Image (cartoon, rainbow, N blue to C red):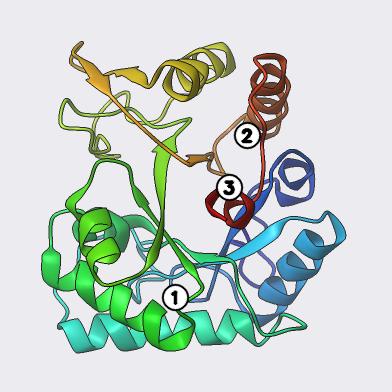
Amino acid sequence: MGESFGMYKMGFDEEVIKHITSANIACGFHAGDPMWMRHTVDLALRHGVAIGAHPSFPDLNGFGRRNMVVSADEAKNDVTYQVGALQAFTADKKLQHVKPHGAMYNMAVNDESLAQAICESILEIDPDMILVALAGSRWLDIAEDMGLKVAREIFADRALNADGTLVSRSQPGSVIHDTAEVVERSLRMVTEGKATAITGEQIDVQADSLCLHGDTPGAVEMAASLKRELEAADVEILPLARILG
C-alpha cells in the first residue's frame, strides 16, 4: 500500500484496507513519498490495521522490480533508511513487520548475503519486528538462525514455480486476475497446505500470511471475497503479531 507518488494515485488502498489485518507500506524507494506515507499510516490506524514497512532497492523508475547489484552494506543501510522513515510517521515509532518489495524480496530468496543484510537491519532497528518472507525459502532459516521473528508468506494473486518461488512478472500468467481462482487457490493453500504450480505440479505450502497486491486489478473484490470465504471456512484472520505471539 501507499504506492502513489505526488499527484499520481495508484491502487485501491481506501477500499482494500477494510478487508485486511496487516499492511505493507511503501517507503519512497520504489513508490510512495512523505505525504502518501503519512496518509497510508493514518488510514491503517483508522481501520485498526497493523503497519509494516515495504522497503526496496532504490528504483523509482522500475518500481523496484528490476534486479540490482548492491553490496550487503548498501542493502542493509537502504532498508534501515526506509524502515526508519516509516517508523517516524507512527505515534509510538513502532512497526509490526518488514516485508521487502519486488526484486529485493525475490533476490533475497536465493542470495544469502542479501537476506542476511536485510535481517541485520531489522534486528538492529527493533528485534521485535517480524520479517515477512517467502514460505519455504532458505531466507526464513537464515532469519530464524539470527534470532529474528518470521512470518511465512504465500501469495493470493501470484503464480508459483514448482520450487515454490514466484513466477516472474515477465512471464504470461504470473499475476492471477480472476477473483474466483484467487479465492479457490488461496483457500486450498491455507486450509490444505497445497498449491498447484504453473507447470502443474502439486506442491506443499505452509504460511502465516496471505499477500494480496493492492494494485492488482480487482483487488477490492478479491480482498472482500477472500476475507468472506476464509471466515466461512473457519479461518481466523489476525494481525501477524497476534498469530506469532
Residue 133, image x, y percentages: 35, 53
Q: What residue type is labelled 1?
A: Phe
Q: What element carries label 1?
A: loop
N-terminal of the pair, mark 1 or mark 2, is 1
- Single out the mark in the foreground, 3 or 1: 3
Q: Is mark 3 on a helix, strand or loop?
A: helix
Q: Mark 2 points at which residue?
A: 219
Q: What residue type is labelled 2?
A: Ala
Quadrant position of residue 169 = top left
Label disc, if present, on residue 29 of the rendered structure: 1
N-terminal of the pair, mark 3 or mark 1, is 1
As rendered, which of 180 and 21 lies closer to the eye? 21
In this view, 242 is above or below 71 = above
Q: Looking at this rendering, what residue extends furthest in the front direction?
A: 245
Give the left or right position of residue 72, taking residue 76 as reference: left
The residue drawn where x is 31% and y is 58% is: 105
